Image: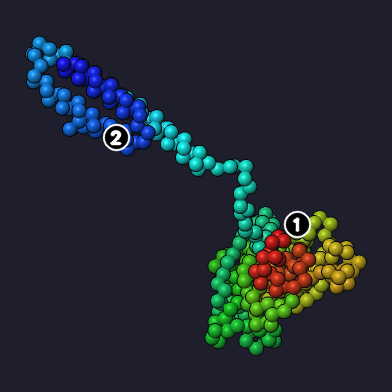
Amino acid sequence: MMKEKLLKLQAEAMEKITSASQPESLEAARLEYLGKKGELTQVLRGMGEVAPEDRPVMGQLVNSVREAVEAAIEMRRRELSSKIMEARLEREKVDVTIPGEPVVTGRRHPLNTVLGEMIDIFTKMGFDIAEGPEVEYDYYNFEALNIPKDHPARDTQDTFYFTDNVLLRTQTSSVQIRVMEKQKPPIRIVAPGRVYRSDAVDATHSPLFHQMEGLVVDKGITMADLKGTLENLAKMMYGEDSVCRFRPHHFPFTEPSAEMDVQCFACHGEGCRLCKGEGWIEVLGAGMVHPKVLRTCGIDPDVYSGFAFGIGLERVTMRRYNIDDLRLLYENDLRFLGQF
């Protein structure tokens, strides 16, 4: 009697398990037959009515039915899980052939591009990179550079002063003074950075612009070393066929002083709109470090000599990309910046 009941129960359980179409209905079938109050549990409670000699056989049958039902439930659970996953993949499938939305990528600013190239050139020539404060003392910006308070050169600087002694630096030459105070020769550094002058904004002037100052101090440094370094710079920036010329000039912190021009790379000296018909383009100012500047920094000018130069980064960038208005570099117009 019990045997027939167990076999009938197994057949009913298998039918319900097979017909379960959702995990919820499968779980309901499991509880119905294997739960604490399930059908199989109820049958087991009737084992006391079975003759003692038949109990081992009935016990094996009960275990067999339980194992069969559990195996069927597990198999059906895997089948349902697989079907659910397939349905989800079908529902959420993505057509990988559809073009994606374009990603707008940033671009390096032309000033940073040229600055990076110049730093790379100078580091290859053995220069170190030096930095200094943009809010500077009058001593480092002027006096230590042989520009006392009554010097006429101060009239052309148009300086932003906070106090009589604190200002926004007008040149990165102040970094050279700080380096020479702390470091004994040999010295070979370039100092790129922002500088400030009270200029009206127009196509060629800005109250904020960038410079890269260079300084070399050692025994036996001559004007020939300066010319060789700058000519090498010009060739690396504008090509091996670049031609340079040096014109006498005056800077308070160098003696002798000069300005360097590069032959126009558009017309090769014949004269064009880019070079304003002159055939040459002014690039930088330079000269031998004034003995008074060396002495102020604690360096004996009778033992050491040096040269210095200053490059306007905006000027080099405008020449490089044929930009005729300085304001374009600072207006953040994506139509302009996107060309680089």
* Nearer to the camera, 208 or 93: 93
Which of the labelled discs sits on residue 27, or is there none? 2
Q: Is residue 17 left or right of residue 111?
A: left
Residue found farthest to the right: 270
Residue found farthest to the bottom: 150
Name which residue lies at 78% across and 59% down: 238
Which of the labelled discs sits on residue 107, or is there none? none
Name which residue lies at 27% across and 31% down: 30
Name which residue lies at 66% across and 72% down: 331
Q: Quadrant of residue 39?
A: top left
Residue of label 1: 236
Q: Is residue 91 left or right of residue 211?
A: left
What percent of the width, then of the height, locates residue 197?
65, 80
**Number of labelled discs?**
2
Name which residue lies at 8% across and 14% down: 51
Instruction: Check disc 2: other Cα within 10 Å, few if <14, some if 14-19, many if 20+.
Output: some
- Location of residue 98 with respect to 52 vertically, above or below: below
Quadrant the N terminus occupies: top left
What percent of the width, then of the height, locates residue 234?
77, 61
Q: CA distance from mark 1 to mark 2?
A: 78 Å
* Nearer to the camera, 7 or 266: 7
- Location of residue 331 with respect to 235 vertically, above or below: below
Secondary structure type for disc 2: helix
Q: Quadrant of residue 230?
A: bottom right
Nearer mark to the viewer, of 1 and 2: 2
Amino acid, disc 1: Met
Query: Could you tell which of marks 1 and 2 lies nearer the N-terminus?
Result: 2
Amino acid, disc 2: Glu
What percent of the width, then of the height, locates residue 52?
8, 13
Instruction: Check disc 1: other Cα within 10 Å, few if <14, some if 14-19, many if 20+.
Output: some
What percent of the width, then of the height, locates residue 111?
67, 65
Task: Work out whether residue 211 can be spotted.
Answer: no
